[in-house]
Amino acid sequence: MTPNVAAAKAALSHLELDDNPVSIRAKSRDFFWYSPVLKPRMDHLLGDFVVAPRNEAEVIEVLKVCYAHDVPVTTRGAGTGNYGQAMPMAGGCILHMKNMAAVKSVFPGRVIVEPGCLLKDVDAACKADSGQELRMFSSTWATATIGGFVAGGSGGVGSCTWGSLRDLGNIIRLRVVTMEEEPRILEFRGEELARVSHAYGTNGIITELEMPLAPAYDWVGLFVAFEDFDAALGYTEDLANQDGILIKIASLYEAPCAHSYFQRVAPYVTEKTHLVGIMVAPQSMDGFETFTARRPAAKVIYQSGANDWARDPGPVFEYGWNHTTLRALKVDPSITYLQVRYGYPTHAEKVRTMREALSPEVLQHLEVIRENGKVMFAGLSLVKFTTEERLDEIVRLHEEAGCMIFNPHRFTLEEGGRQTVDDRQLNFKREADPKGLLNPGKMIAWDDPNWGFERIYSYPGMKAAE
Amino acid sequence: MTPNVAAAKAALSHLELDDNPVSIRAKSRDFFWYSPVLKPRMDHLLGDFVVAPRNEAEVIEVLKVCYAHDVPVTTRGAGTGNYGQAMPMAGGCILHMKNMAAVKSVFPGRVIVEPGCLLKDVDAACKADSGQELRMFSSTWATATIGGFVAGGSGGVGSCTWGSLRDLGNIIRLRVVTMEEEPRILEFRGEELARVSHAYGTNGIITELEMPLAPAYDWVGLFVAFEDFDAALGYTEDLANQDGILIKIASLYEAPCAHSYFQRVAPYVTEKTHLVGIMVAPQSMDGFETFTARRPAAKVIYQSGANDWARDPGPVFEYGWNHTTLRALKVDPSITYLQVRYGYPTHAEKVRTMREALSPEVLQHLEVIRENGKVMFAGLSLVKFTTEERLDEIVRLHEEAGCMIFNPHRFTLEEGGRQTVDDRQLNFKREADPKGLLNPGKMIAWDDPNWGFERIYSYPGMKAAE
Ligand SMILES: Cc1cc2nc3c(=O)[nH]c(=O)nc-3n(C[C@H](O)[C@H](O)[C@H](O)COP(=O)(O)OP(=O)(O)OC[C@H]3O[C@@H](n4cnc5c(N)ncnc54)[C@H](O)[C@@H]3O)c2cc1C
Ligand SMILES: Cc1cc2nc3c(=O)[nH]c(=O)nc-3n(C[C@H](O)[C@H](O)[C@H](O)COP(=O)(O)OP(=O)(O)OC[C@H]3O[C@@H](n4cnc5c(N)ncnc54)[C@H](O)[C@@H]3O)c2cc1C
């Protein structure tokens, strides 16, 4: 099966098609370079052309043409993914969703939107319409798309209240186009959502989303400083367990993260400061202040709209989730990270265990999430990278201690997830992408069902470096 | 200290004052008669006159005049309280709040309202203004006042999400008038709220409230039937733990409660049906249906707006909380109830223990509540009343099994609560009601600090039956 790229390009030339090498290079990259493991392996990857459909009919046309000519198709939202999810492993067509960005309608509690809409634009439209916003969003709110969030993300700002994207109710409906001789349009709800959500676009293209909304508030951003890590940990967990205090994010950064990596915060903390970042609904500020006053170890050092800081630090959520890693990387390029699940009820204990074992080589960065109704932690630990072997060992140490790792140094669905095949995704790929052209190389179960996970998957179809 | 009722009446005659014996009788009663223990003890109680201030200045006038003439003042919202909270134990003035019912302003996430406003009118105004409603309300939403709810209630519909009224953040601000020679106006927030919330009006009159709001949705009411109690229990708890599915109430009624006491539901269930009542946000219905389809034991028998029932059962929440008792009482006057706290993480186990020990004399009626971030149960068990001795024994059996009882057969704050003195309330009463004229007989700590709780408190100042 040799792709006939030239034929596909010719057949699609009436669409918004771009084959300028500079554009191709730009649109063939995501944030894979966060990982020192993925960087050398993926840096050379390039698609052959970029096409930006204006509507679903054009998406269908692209898929049909590429199917006919055996050309791989890798979908691109904004390319802010971290695991090379949007990297065109085998070249081919980059399907750029930027022109499908309409907010179609807003209702009480839900929005219908096209996939290329930026998260911040979804929120702006919902707020203007009826004081609503997305329940949860990636910390790349300002730059990422809603389609990319659902196809590639997991949760984020808001997950302390609403859980993760995969939880029932956090996606209502997805409209999906298949890559067959005659592409089909399917509408998924309920159990069917798991086929394509967080599937990296390997088995269908999302052309419309229906997402639940929460009320939009003028969230108050706060930084709370602690001298003692355990006090900070207890504070963060207890706050998140206050049923009457509505928060949008609660993050904990082990010292000296704030001092070393948060430039605008640094003047107000020391190397010993463990920092907690929070966003509180305005109507909950009294409750928040009462709660905080009961804990003398907690010092509120920053409150948005009520502070005398020389330079505003910007939105508090842009310190959390993977923005923490971004800020650390900018200061110290040798930093990378891991994604850890500290499950209830042993979450706090496990955090302490890992910190004792690995700090400061691994610094704790925790995000409060809810899972099955319980407050617990997602760790996006900052790791001082030395070698791949040591990184693997750190992964192993976590797993031995009972902490689940979602390895961000792997580009496949399975290795970045629970290392098991998701049959719903695989079976749907069989139906919807019979030639295996959608984002090739990202689903091991499709390529090599017997892969053993002992070492990083090496996709045989990967475009070689020139 | 002999009250000079005549002098007080004369001094207040320019206000809306009512001393018609029929009105006095009507306004001297609440739902104390739910309790076969309180009924004979309180049935005869009568105030001397009813006054309905039109604004805060008139409240102050009433309190000042009654202070001068040593006349007790018992505040009345709508008189739907269950423990004789609003019964004028020592006669005197009944301060009826019905004329202070304005919704003053609505903001994103909060409302400022006068105490005499009905819960349903608060919601109507907030919904009309900006699609908002109270986070939680008593199931007497249609008849009770917001002031009575905060002064006498604990939580209710919405507590499965937001916890209880006493939790930080669920009341923002209370404006309170004291009963002194010169009444003072105080504004309470934060820690100070605990002085007067759930204090039965024993230490100040609430003249304005600021309450947090949640979005108003067209909640879908559902009844789900089970053959097996444990399946129903597990379903209810698991549903409430679904972070992405927004619910407003989840109640479980042990068989044959639905068949025997819920007239309009009875044709659709059997004597063996354990029933679960739920309200789900419309945008969460897909998630709810997916969740329910995973549990074959669950049969959805009713959905509001989508059913062929001959007679509409009305709002699902009017089957929950203390409406369950009301419905049972109407069919079988020998039924009464108990309030139980089944605390996390042994809540389900304790429910099973009590059911095994006491069903069908005590039927389980459970309401999902959140406490400290965890889903657990409030029990409003239906009790087949025989004697006071047996009722006390049932209380004891619960306590021995580690289930906390809030005894609804007691009229004092302490006996209906944790049997301990609330120093914040007592200390504030010393300041705010030096003559002890506000709702006398309801705070044991004020009357008799050495009371031992072995038997029901008998208030020496109680007006004798004629
Ligand atoms: C600083 C930083 C912070 C981050 N914080 C978070 C966070 O808080 N939470 C989180 O979950 N992630 C986070 N991420 C990862 C990523 O930014 C988010 O998942 C983001 O929402 C991806 O959106 P995107 O538009 O950039 O998607 P892309 O990176 O363009 O795509 C992501 C994946 O989805 C596929 N895809 C895109 N659109 C479609 C479509 N319409 N149909 C089918 N497949 C499609 C792509 O092929 C790719 O596999 C972060 C990344 C960075 C760099
Ligand atoms: C069928 C039924 C169901 C119920 N369900 C619930 C439930 O779900 N949750 C719940 O918490 N309760 C419940 N209750 C109890 C009661 O209805 C509620 O607490 C209700 O909110 C009380 O409001 P009210 O206006 O009737 O207050 P009232 O009964 O008039 O007063 C209650 C107490 O507050 C005092 N008070 C009233 N207004 C003021 C004021 N402005 N300042 C100071 N003190 C004041 C009174 O003196 C009295 O002590 C239920 C009762 C019944 C009969």
Image (cartoon, coloured by chain):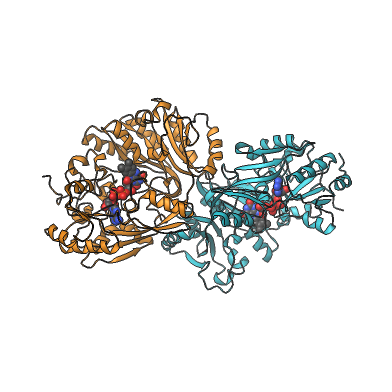
Chain colours: A cyan, B orange
Residue B226: quarter of image: top left
The reply, left or right, for residue B48 in relation to residue B200 is left
Residue B132 locus on image (x, y percent): 47, 52
Residue A386's x, y, as percent? 70, 58
Q: Is residue A183 visible?
A: yes
Q: Count all numbered tags in the image, as a single digit.
A: 0
The one of B449 and B209 positioned closer to us in this rendering: B209
Between residues B452 and A213, which one lies in front from this camera angle?
A213
Quadrant for residue B80, please give it. top left
Q: Where residue A296 appears, x then y in whole percent? A: 43, 64
The answer to whether any part of residue A338 appears in the image is: no
Q: Which residue: 27% across, 55% down?
A: B201
Q: Is residue A415 above or below residue B272?
A: below
Is A121 on the left-hand or right-hand side of B49? right
Side of A15 where B325 appears, left or right? left
Q: Quadrant of the N terminus of chain A?
A: top right
Q: Horizontal placement of A388 versus B135: left or right?
A: right
> What residue is drawn where x is 52% and y is 32%?
B295
Residue B49 x, y percent position in the rendering: 18, 53
